[in-house]
């Protein structure tokens, strides 16, 4: 039997790394995991420059200790590579997953471009997580591969729509998620669903206050499992108004929720398929959501979202592929 590589999943985005570690553990494979709050301080720096610098010391020591026991590091997000490249860190081969904003925006920003490109060039292998990143990622690195934002299925509760129908906007209210179009959709749905269903969404992003004014009841940011429970009680999930989906939409689809979203999605680069959701122009989406609220389970069956999403986004499906890659990179 070949020797298994000692792997460190470093940093995280949308709990993708955590999902991979959990799926690997269920397969009898032990991967180490350093989440964002353990790789860098998450609080505002003290005004005193010495204290501001000193607060990094325990994080640096933790990173160094984790790297010393790893054969391969899987870094999640482009700017996180600098944290394993500091002077005190042992050199290790790394895989890099570009999770979205790093390649979509920062790579094109003069302030970040060189750093992101160095991180890409230095990686033993590069993945990109969103369908809209294909052109940019393969321009930055011709052999970059699509690797979806996977989901940890056992963490998802059973879908059980509440007796009082709830339609939930899944994403935060900002430009990356098409906030202008989302606010317009919220206003129209509020009118069309008056007395039939409640609109809810997260109090997260610069457009949140306007969403509330447009008829959305805002929920404060909450622990992930509590968010899943809230989502599982929804009759319909409203995805982001962009040409790609993020992890939250795929989590909703894996649960079985019928999902609606303005516009249309890009096909997956690997199999050419697209998420089966209620989509189109504003009036089309509103009418489909109104119909789905009256029979969410029937709508779910017709769309077949879970049947499409589970085999494509279950983290466990990808563990063998990654394990073979890590083994090859570690030599």
Image (cartoon, grey):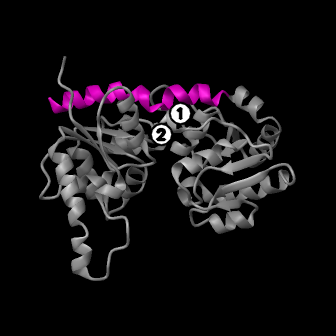
Which residues are the magenta region?
A: 304-331
On the image, numbered disc 1 is attached to which residue?
267
* Disc on res. 69: none
- Which residue is rendered at x = 69% and y = 40% of the image? 279
Decide: is 53 above or below 103.
below
Q: Position of residue 183 (x, y in %)?
A: 69, 59
Element under label 2? helix
Q: Is residue 182 above or below residue 96?
A: below
Decide: is 143 above or below 15. Answer: above
User: Residue 104 appears at what percent x and percent y?
Assistant: 42, 52
Around disc 2, counting alpha carbons within 10 Å, would you say few (fewer than 14), some (14 to 19), or many (20 or more)? Answer: many
User: Quick one: quadrant of the N terminus?
Assistant: top left
Q: Is residue 272 visible?
A: no
Q: What secondary structure prevails in the magenta region?
A: helix
In the drawing, what numbered circle is on residue 131? Answer: 2
In the image, 203: left or right of 269? right
Q: Position of residue 48 (x, y in %)?
A: 27, 83
Q: Residue furthest bottom?
A: 48
Please identify the quadrant where the C terminus is shown.
top left
Examine the rendering and report whether any part of residue 17 can be seen: yes
The quarter holding residue 190 reads bottom right
Mark 1: few/some/many CA within 10 Å (<14, 14-19, 20+): some
292 on left or right of 91:
right
Q: Name the residue: 22% across, 55% down.
A: 62
Contact between marks 1 and 2 (CB within 8 A): the answer is yes
Q: Pick the residue in front: 95 or 19.
A: 19
Q: Is residue 306 magenta?
A: yes
Q: Name the residue rendered at 83%, 56% in the picture.
A: 191
Does the magenta segment cover residue 230? no
Upstream in the sequence, badge 1 or badge 2? 2
Q: Residue 150: x percent and y percent?
A: 46, 37
| Circle 1 SS class | loop
């Amino acid at each position: 039997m070949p020797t298994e590589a000692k792997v460190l999943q470093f940093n995280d985005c949308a709990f993708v790394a955590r999902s991979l570690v959990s799926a690997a553990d269920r397969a009898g494979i032990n991967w180490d995991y350093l989440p964002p709050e353990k790789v860098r301080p998450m609080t505002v720096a003290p005004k005193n420059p010495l204290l501001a610098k000193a607060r990094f010391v325990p994080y640096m020591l933790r990173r160094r200790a984790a790297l010393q026991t790893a054969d391969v590091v899987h870094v999640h997000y482009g700017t996180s590579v600098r944290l394993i490249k500091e002077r005190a860190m042992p050199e290790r081969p790394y895989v890099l997953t570009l999770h979205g904003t790093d390649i979509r925006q920062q790579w094109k920003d003069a302030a970040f471009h060189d750093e992101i490109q160095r991180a890409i060039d230095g990686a033993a292998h590069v993945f990109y997580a969103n369908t809209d990143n294909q052109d940019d990622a393969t321009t930055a690195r011709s052999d970059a591969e699509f690797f979806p934002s996977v989901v940890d299925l056992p963490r998802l509760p059973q879908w059980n729509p509440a007796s009082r129908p709830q339609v939930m906007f899944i994403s935060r209210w900002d430009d990356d998620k098409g906030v202008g179009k989302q606010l317009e959709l919220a206003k129209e749905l509020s009118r069309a669903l008056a007395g039939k269903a409640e609109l809810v969404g997260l109090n997260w992003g610069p457009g949140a206050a306007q969403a509330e004014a447009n008829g959305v009841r805002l929920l404060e940011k909450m622990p992930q499992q509590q968010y899943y429970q809230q989502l599982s009680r929804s009759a319909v999930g409203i995805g982001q108004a962009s040409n790609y989906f993020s992890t939250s939409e795929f989590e909703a689809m894996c649960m079985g929720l019928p999902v609606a979203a303005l516009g249309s999605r890009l096909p997956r680069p690997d199999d050419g398929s697209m998420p089966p959701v209620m989509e189109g122009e504003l009036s089309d989406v509103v009418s489909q959501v109104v119909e789905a609220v009256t029979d969410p389970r029937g709508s779910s069956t017709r769309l077949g979202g879970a049947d499409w999403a589970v085999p494509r986004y279950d983290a466990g499906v990808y563990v063998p592929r990654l394990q073979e890659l890590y083994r090859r990179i570690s030599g």
